[in-house]
Structure formats: structure tokens, C-alpha cells
Image (cartoon, grey):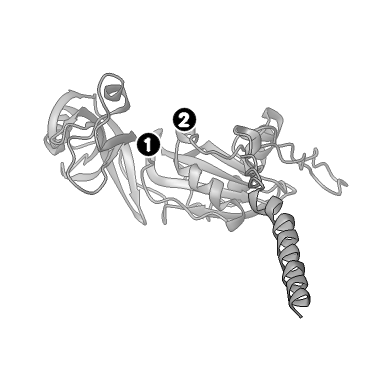
């Protein structure tokens, strides 16, 4: 009996030792290396479904179609006999449809708040139109207020230390179905918080009332105690402060809405071309979606070109 018990214990011991030997390599094996990070650069991003920088041929065709559509639907744009329109920028979608924004002038003066967006189908034909203005301007362009007076009123509207005041020029401010002749003056200087400023001031050319202001320089600061915001230029020669200043140029007046298909790109349309960058994804070339469009063509393809 003693020998039999010893044999059982020996068998159990050998079984445990074998199990431990089999489990040991798995327990001591090194963990699997992490997956490599994706490569940086434009190729790391998915192609955008639109471009704001199509080829010259596509831009020419799109602008021509948009101008034709605007001419045919001038009533929807509240176009008056003294109005003229010029293309500011455009977006071409992957399927060939497009949105084109026009700036308005009235008797040769810039008409702020009078911009129009024309949308085209993928074959280049008219789809829809949006106008920021609700009526065509009809007003005299003779001011009752002198330019020098408008300059002083604009400088007075600036809060901070003004370094320079531009020569005022006449413009038209549209707001719904209202319109007003204004003097526009740019006052440059430093605000009380020591951030730079380029303040555009619109002064009514008859009453002298400040109708609108727009600053080219936008500032932001994180929550909590912080010193004055600094510009990128100042940061080169000093340690960065816990706040920052950034430049952003915006357009006067409300902006018409854009179709969902172009929404991401349409948000850029309210900014001049020099401020469209800073977007990680590359705006790459959609396939050619616009052909010559003559009678009998079954489709019109538009080559959007690379738009990084």
C-alpha cells in the first residue's frame, strides 16, 4: 500500500511539472509589438469629396455656367439695373455639381451683404440660387457726410491705441430689404488687452451712425489667469504666453445657405482664398465630370484637378 501511494504521488508530481513546462514559454513570451502608426503627410488623409481649386478649364466652365444661371434668374437674386456681380470663389463636388459665390457691386461700389450663391447640377445646368439681400438697392451714392468726418468717427469707435486710419471709401451696406450708403474706414492699432487690431468701421454716409464693425484679428484665450495674448510674431522672440491671437478675415453681411453635399466646403466660401488653408485633409481631384455640353451630349464631366 505504501508503494502504491508513493507511485500515485510521483505520477501527480510529474504531471504538474509537465504542465508547468508547457505553460512557461507562453507566460514568459514577449508581448506583441504595437501596430505601426500611419504615415504622416497628405497620403494619410482620405480624399475630400470636393475641391475649391479645380483646373483652369473646369473653373472657366463652372464660372460661365454660373454667370449664365445668374443672368437667367436675376429676379431671385434681387438684381437691379445698377448691380454687377463678380465671382469670389467656388466649390466643385466629386459628382460635378458646383456652388459659386458672387460679390455684388452697386453703381461700382461694393455692396456688403449682397452676395449671391448659385448652385449648379452635375451637368452644369441651374439648380438653385440664394441671395443674402432681400431687395435690390435703390439709393443715391452722394454722401451727406464728408470723408474726414467719417474718418474721425471711425477712429472714435476704436477701443485701444490707434496707429493708423485708412482713407475712407464709399460702399453700400445691405441688410435684408434695407440699404444704406456708408463710408468704410480701417483703423489699425492695439486693443487695451495688447492684441493687434485692424478694425473695419462702416459709418452711415448721411447720419454718421456706426452701422457695423468687423475686426480682421480674432483673439481667444484659455480659461484661467493669463497675460496679454501674443501674436505669432511675438512668440518667436519670447516664451509663449498662456493665451494666443489668431487672424481671421470674414465677409460683410449674412451668407446664404449651401446644399448639404457641399457643406464642408461651403463653410469655406465665406472666407477669402488666402484663409482657406489649415485643413489637414487634402482636397484631391475628383474625376472629370464636365464635357463640352453641346446639344446631344449625354453627360458633362468636370475635371476638378488637384486641390490641395
Q: Residue at x 56, y 54 (%)?
A: 129
Q: Residue at x 74, y 56 (%)?
A: 22
Where does residue 127 sit, x and y in percent of width and height? Answer: 65, 55
Circles 2 and 1 in contact, beta carbons < 8 Å:
yes
Q: CA distance from mark 2 to mark 1?
A: 9 Å
Q: Residue at x 67, y 32 (%)?
A: 306
Residue 112 position by quadrant: top left
For mark 2, does the 10 Å Cα neighbourhood hold few (<14), some (14 to 19), or many (20 or more) residues?
few
Label 1 sits on a secondary structure element that is: loop
Give the camera-side residue of 14 and 179: 14
Q: Residue at x 36, y 56 (%)?
A: 177
Residue at the limit of the structure toward the front, as seen here: 2
Residue 71 position by quadrant: top right
The residue to which callout 2 is attached is: 274
Label 2 sits on a secondary structure element that is: helix
Residue 50 in sight from this viewpoint:
yes
User: On the rendered structure, is 155 left or right of 95?
Assistant: left
Residue 63 in sight from this viewpoint:
no
Residue at the limit of the structure toward the top, as seen here: 237
Where does residue 219 sit, x and y in percent of width and height? Answer: 27, 39
The residue to which callout 1 is attached is: 249
| Disc with the residue nearer the chain's start (2 vs 1) | 1
Amino acid at each position: 500500500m505504501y508503494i502504491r501511494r508513493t507511485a500515485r504521488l510521483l505520477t501527480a508530481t510529474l504531471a504538474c511539472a509537465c504542465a508547468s513546462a508547457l505553460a512557461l514559454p507562453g507566460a514568459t513570451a514577449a508581448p506583441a509589438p504595437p501596430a505601426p502608426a500611419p504615415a504622416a503627410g497628405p497620403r494619410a488623409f482620405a480624399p475630400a469629396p470636393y475641391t475649391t481649386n479645380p483646373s483652369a478649364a473646369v473653373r472657366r466652365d463652372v464660372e460661365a455656367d454660373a454667370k449664365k444661371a445668374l443672368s437667367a434668374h436675376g429676379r431671385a437674386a434681387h438684381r437691379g439695373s445698377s448691380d454687377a456681380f463678380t465671382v469670389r470663389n467656388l466649390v466643385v463636388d466629386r459628382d460635378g455639381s458646383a456652388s459659386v459665390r458672387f460679390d455684388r457691386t452697386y453703381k461700382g461700389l461694393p455692396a456688403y451683404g449682397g452676395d449671391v450663391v448659385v448652385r449648379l447640377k452635375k451637368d452644369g445646368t441651374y439648380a438653385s440660387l440664394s441671395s443674402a439681400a432681400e431687395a435690390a438697392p435703390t439709393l443715391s451714392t452722394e454722401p451727406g457726410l464728408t470723408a474726414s468726418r467719417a474718418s474721425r468717427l471711425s477712429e472714435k469707435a476704436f477701443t485701444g491705441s490707434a496707429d493708423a486710419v485708412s482713407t475712407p471709401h464709399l460702399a453700400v451696406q445691405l441688410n435684408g430689404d434695407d440699404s444704406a450708403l456708408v463710408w468704410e474706414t480701417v483703423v489699425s492699432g492695439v486693443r487695451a488687452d495688447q492684441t493687434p487690431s485692424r478694425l473695419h468701421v462702416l459709418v452711415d454716409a448721411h447720419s454718421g451712425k456706426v452701422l457695423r464693425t468687423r475686426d480682421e484679428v480674432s483673439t481667444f484665450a484659455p480659461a484661467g489667469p493669463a497675460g496679454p495674448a501674443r501674436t505669432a510674431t511675438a512668440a518667436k522672440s519670447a516664451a509663449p504666453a498662456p493665451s494666443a491671437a489668431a487672424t481671421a478675415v470674414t465677409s460683410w453681411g449674412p451668407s446664404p445657405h449651401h446644399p448639404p453635399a457641399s457643406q464642408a466646403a461651403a463653410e469655406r466660401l465665406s472666407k477669402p482664398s488666402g484663409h482657406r488653408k489649415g485643413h489637414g485633409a487634402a482636397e484631391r481631384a475628383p474625376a472629370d465630370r464636365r464635357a463640352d455640353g453641346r446639344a446631344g451630349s449625354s453627360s458633362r464631366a468636370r475635371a476638378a484637378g488637384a486641390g490641395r
